Amino acid sequence: MLGPEGFIFEKYIGCLFRENNYIVKTNRWINGKCIDYEIDVLIEKNNNILIGECKYRNKQGERIDVGVCLKSYATFFDIKNGNYFKEEIKPIIITNAKFTTKAIKYANCQGVELLGWNHPENNGLEYLIENKNLYPITILPSFKQSFINAFFSNEIITIKDILLIDIEKFSKKVNIPISQLEKIKKEAQALCH
């Protein structure tokens, strides 16, 4: 339920990296040498900056192919040759899917970091999620598609965020019945423990 557009997925990825002590900015326009680009996420830690391209896939079995890596590297190369950043920058592609063999080979050759399902092995996206219980709120059985805007516009993206809300105040603010919010919060508590 984090799609079909990638914007919600980008916000979710921002949360994952913030929880791991990165400085994150989403949806920024950056000038390259030739043109400007909308960057999904900028991820910074220790003066190293990752220029992130997020690719959300709705269908099970879809893979990220070499074309995505080529585009991401071309964007990175133009930005690197511009004068926007003084710090060291590196490209990263982040997805909820898997990568094709050619995508991995090209990325390794060009120095493009990849973060996806089970990639890198034993340290992929699922590891980041499970390691800190950063499951998206959409994983909860009682969570309805119609709730997405109410939750995400209030920066409630992970199940940990749900545990922090005052149900009565939130119910009044977003017009979702308290009983439904209590059910969602109870499911979040069970998953976190």
Image (cartoon, rainbow, N blue to C red):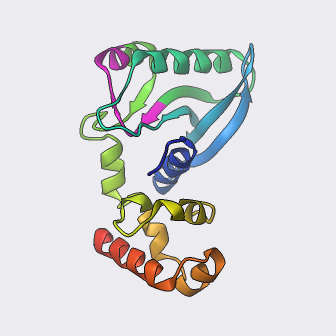
Q: What are the residue bounds of the magenta stretch?
A: 93-105
Camera sees residue 46: no
Position of 161 with respect to 109 (left or right) is: right
The residue lying furthest to the left in this view is 122
Quarter where residue 193 is shown: bottom left
User: Is 173 rendered above or below residue 39?
Assistant: below
Camera sees residue 61: yes
Quarter where residue 37 is shown: top right
Q: How many numbered badges does the structure rendering display?
A: 0
In the image, residue 98 lies at what x, y percent?
32, 31
Which sits in the foreground, 31 or 23? 31
Quarter where residue 83 is shown: top right
Whether 104 is among the magenta residues is yes
- Residue in view at x 35 percent, y 43 percent: 125
Position of 97 with respect to 17 (left or right) is: left
Which sits in the foreground, 180 or 67? 180
User: Is 111 rendered above or below residue 24?
Assistant: above
Which sits in the foreground, 96 or 179? 179
- Residue in view at x 47 percent, y 49 percent: 2
User: Is 111 rendered above or below residue 45?
Assistant: above
In the image, residue 52 lies at what x, y percent?
54, 33
In the image, residue 48 lies at what x, y percent?
56, 35
In the image, residue 35 lies at what x, y percent?
75, 18
The residue lying furthest to the bottom in this view is 168
- Residue in view at x 37 percent, y 71 percent: 188
Whether 125 is among the magenta residues is no
User: Is 110 rendered above or below residue 168?
Assistant: above
